[in-house]
Every structure is written in structure tokens, then in C-alpha cells.
Image (tube, grey):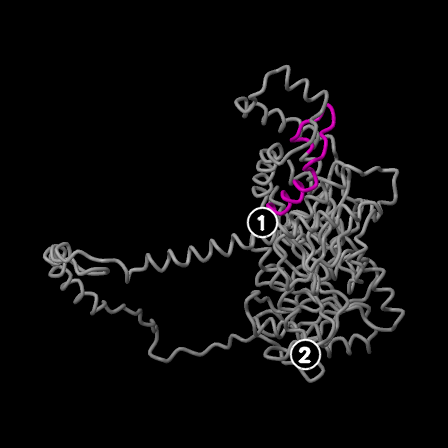
Amino acid sequence: MLEQLLIFTRGGLILWTCKELGKALKGSPIDTLIRSCLLEERSGEVSFNYEAYTLKWTFHNDLGLVFVAVYQRILHLLYVDDLLSMVKESFSEIYDPKRMSYDDFDETFRQLRMEAEARGMTNGNHKMEDDDSDKTNGKENTADNVVLDPSKLMKLRSKGVRGRGGVRKTDSIGNKSSKVAAAEPPKKATKKNRVWDDAAPKQVKLDFTDSVDENGNGNHDHVDIAAADQGESMMDKEEVFSSDDESEDDDDDELRSDEKKPEAKKKGWFSSVFQSITGKANLERTDLEPALKALKERLMTKNVAEEIAEKLCESVEASLEGKKLASFTRISSTVQGAMEDALIRILTPRRSIDIMRDVHAAKEQRRPYVVVFVGVNGVGKSTNLAKVAYWLQQHKVSVMMAACDTFRSGAVEQLRTHARRLQIPIFEKGYEKDPAVVAKEAIQEATRNGSDVVLVDTAGRMQDNEPLMRALSKLINLNKPDLVLFVGEALVGNDAVDQLSKFNQKLSDLSNSGTTRLIDGILLTKFDTIDDKVGAALSMVYISGAPVMFVGCGQSYTDLKKLNVKAIVKTLLK
């Protein structure tokens, strides 16, 4: 049963609601739809599920109206799409921007609803009849009912065919030798260890981990300390972005596209000029498809995941369909402008995460600010953790590192080297320890010593590794960090969607506490190696909703900067 149907403007003004369906909705499905779907450029999706409800919607882009229907998720109402289209058509005829009340639309909606329900019942009955006919036809065409001709069967046997998977007589003799050869595979020769002397080789100890006492302190006197003072971090430098060069590139791209597609201009010169002056009445889906297809291919060449590029194009299509084309504008420029606005909205953070402000707030509460670095193997978590530590040092913030990667060999030594170069205390317990317990003890040690920030390094893990994901979920739930940073490579394409979605899904499924903790921010690494293939940033932000807080762009401690949204958008659409 239909729970509610609303009509409101894109500005949020509710024009009409069905008074017959006056039931109070549980929660806030409409607000969640606007925040999670419409504002996040996911309006091209078919439906949206919120708790026990399913929401469907349609737009009237020319008038700036949104029509939303809400019904129970367990019900599969076949008439909702038809009802929305009919309500859209009828309401647009009486809509007046100066009018605020539409009480006379109640009777019209009642008739439209009855008509849509009747159509849905008719279509459902036809579908059931078609399914029944398909089933009967399937039974009649089964292999059991097929009659074979005995004469044809004897001819096939005489030729040596034994049916499916059978072998001909001519091939059976030749295959005997091959079967014998296959039964005895050649033995693989193994290389013997070379011994230079008569004496047995000495066993060399490969574990260079220093001995650690109960407090996590070890003997590190044999390593020289080289304080790393490499200047100001790029995080504190404002990146200047010139729009003149980009506009010239855009003009060149338009000229090249016009030169490449002379055959696409089927209309005459006068008709095309007249249409550009007067403007097209309403944009239709067929008008938008060529430009959207070219835009999707361009996004995919920039390393945007195919699924994300397709959803973005569907969202832009939904926002432009039915809208009037302005004078002296082309469809391709209109589509590109809509896509540019959508990309800026996606990459701009929905909520402000000011680490320095949060650090001072935690300091007033006499506790350390805890940041946990997570991600897959080999993306540069430890190296970029050191870059973040260097940036915090530049702002006179005391930092402690926690070596909670007790799984990978050499992880503790790597972090220890960074700590000595930056002259930062490190808390370590060696290997084969519970990372959650090590992180908890590190936070307690930082509280006693008065450290402002604790940077927790974790082991790299694939998103499908259940034991390691369970250990990570335990670490986050036990220590409740202030910030969970996902460290990802800027080189990945479609895999970025899989990594982030599964990390969030595993953290949600394996959470033992009532409040689920997901990824708060993203740190993109190896950004200096991708040239213009910047699509991974868009894919990660789109699939997780978390902002890109840091961008690693080099091998020194200063090579950490903020994400320039305008530069990324220009590069994606270049």
C-alpha cells in the first residue's frame, strides 16, 4: 500500500501531500533521500531503500519540481512508476510559481491513483499468464519428450560417435599413447644446495628486532639519529590554480571534437544556427545520449570506475531531461556544465574535518587525539603516517607513533626508523601481539606522557581477509579512535570501489558495539605518478561519502598536500 506521495521544489518547499495517506512516516525517509541520494548525484538510481520503506521519484527539470512516492519495502507495487508519471503530467499543467496551495489536486490524484492501480492489476495478470505459458512450453521442449529416429541412431553408432562427450573410433587408438604419457608426468629436477666447504653452513639469524621490555622500551643506541628538517609541509601551502590555461585547453578540445565529427552534423546550416539562437524547447533523452556517452568514456579514461561513471551520467541525465536549452548554447556544453557542478558537489566535503581544531579540543579534555591508518597491502600507510606526523610537528603538536602492525615482518623497524628521523616517541611491543591491546596501551602511555596525538599504524589487509578484518574491527571498537583514515593508491581504478565498499561493509558487519564506526576520511598516495588519471579520488569519495583529507605526492616528509577540487574537476573533464 502507498504510504505517502509528496511534491516539492528543488529548494525544499513542499507544495502538496496526499491527505488520504496521512500516516506519519517512521524516521525521516524524505530527508535521508535528499541527503544521501539527490544531493550526492545518485538521482539516476531506480529506487532508494530506507528502513522499512522504498522511495521512488521523478523530476520535472523545467519547472524544478520533485515527485516522491513512499511505500512499504515488502510490497512490490507495480503501478508506482505510472502513477508518478501521471501525477507529474497533471500537476505541471496547474503549477504556478506564485501559488502556494494546491488543495484542489486531491480529487485529481484520487482518480489518477485508481487508474494506475487498475493498470497495475492488468499488467500483473498478463505477466502471470506469460510465465505460465513459458513454463508449459518449457515442459514440452524437454529432452525426455524428444523422439529419436532409430535408423539415424544406428548410422551415428556405425561412424563411431558415442553421444555427448564421446570419442570417435579413429581417435581412440591414437589417444592410448597420450593417456599413458599423461599418466606418468616427468619428474621435476630439483637444484641441490651448493656447499663450498666440508663444514655445515652456519645458520644466520634474520630477526633484527631489538629486545623489548614490558614497557615497550628497547635498546636503540646503535642507530644514528638524523633529525628530519625538510622545510614547510605542502599541506600549509596554498596551491595556485590558473584557469586561463584550462580555458584554452577546453577551447582546443572543442575545436578538435568539431574536426573529428564532421559527419555527425546531419542538420543544415540555417537550422542549426536558428536552433542555437532560439534554444531547444525541451531536452530529451535522445538529445543527451551522445554527449553523455562521450563524457562517460572520457571519465573512464581518467581512471574513474565504470560503475561510478555510469551512475554519474545517469544522474546528470535525470537532472537535464525535460529542461529547456538556453539560447546560444550547445547540448554538449550544457551537459559538461551540469557534470562539472555535480563533480564539485561530490568532491567538496559534506562535513568539515579540521584536525587541528579537533586536536586542541581533545587536549582540553586531557586526552590524546587518536588517528588509525587502515588500508590494503603496499599502499604506503607507514610512510604517509610519518608525513602526517611531520605536518603535525610543524604546528607544535606532540605526536606518538603506535606500531600496531604486528603481522608484517619489518613493519616495526620501518616505523621505528621514521620515529628516530623525526625524533618522535614510538610505542611498540614487537610481533605476534594483539594489535587492539597494543593500541590501547599506546593510548594509555600517551595520556600519561601528555602526547597530543597518537598515530596508530595497522597491518595491510585485503578486503576479503576475514580474520584480519575482524582484528581491525576489534581495534576500532575497543579504542574508539577520533579519526579512521583509509589509505589508498591513486593508481587503482575499478578496485577502489571494491576496496572501500567492502572495508565499510566488514567494519559494519563485524562491529560488536551498538554504534557502527566506518571510514571517516581518505588519504590518497602516489598521486605524483598518475599524470591526469585522477579518477580514483572521485571513485573513492563517491562510494564512501568520506572526503579526501590528504594527498601524498612524493617521497619526502613535506610531500603531503590538500586535494584541489577545482583542479581535479578540470582534469577529469579535460
Label 1 SS = loop
Seen from the viewer's position, the closer of residues 114 and 146 is 114
- Mark 1, residues whose alpha carbon is within 10 Å: few (<14), some, or many (≥20)? many
- Mark 2, residues whose alpha carbon is within 10 Å: few (<14), some, or many (≥20)? some
Residue range highlighted in magenta: 309-334
Q: Which amino acid does label 2 sit on?
A: Gly
Residue 333, position as x, y percentages in the image: 68, 31
The residue identified by callout 1 is 305
Seen from the viewer's position, the closer of residues 365 and 540 is 540
The residue identified by callout 2 is 218
Check if residue 11 falls in the magenta segment.
no
Label 2 SS = loop
Residue at 84 percent of width and 37 percent of height:
96
Q: What residue type is labelled 1?
A: Ala
Tell me which label, 2 or 1, sits earlier in the chain.
2
Seen from the viewer's position, the closer of residues 12 and 438 is 12
Residue 28, position as x, y percentages in the image: 78, 61
Is 261 situated above or below 217? Answer: above
Q: Residue furthest bottom?
A: 214
The residues bearing labels 2 and 1 have C-alpha atoms spaced at a distance of 46 Å
Seen from the viewer's position, the closer of residues 206 and 109 is 109
Horizontal arrangement in the rendering, residue 109 relative to residue 146 (left or right): right
Q: Name the front one of labels 2 and 1.
A: 1
Is residue 484 at all visible to an observer of this figure?
yes
Residue at 71 percent of width and 24 percent of height:
279
Horizontal arrangement in the rendering, residue 510 relative to residue 170 (left or right): right
Q: Which residue lies furthest to the top in this view?
A: 270
Which quadrant of the figure contains the C terminus? top right
Q: In which quarter of the image is residue 477?
A: bottom right
Residue 445, position as x, y percentages in the image: 77, 78
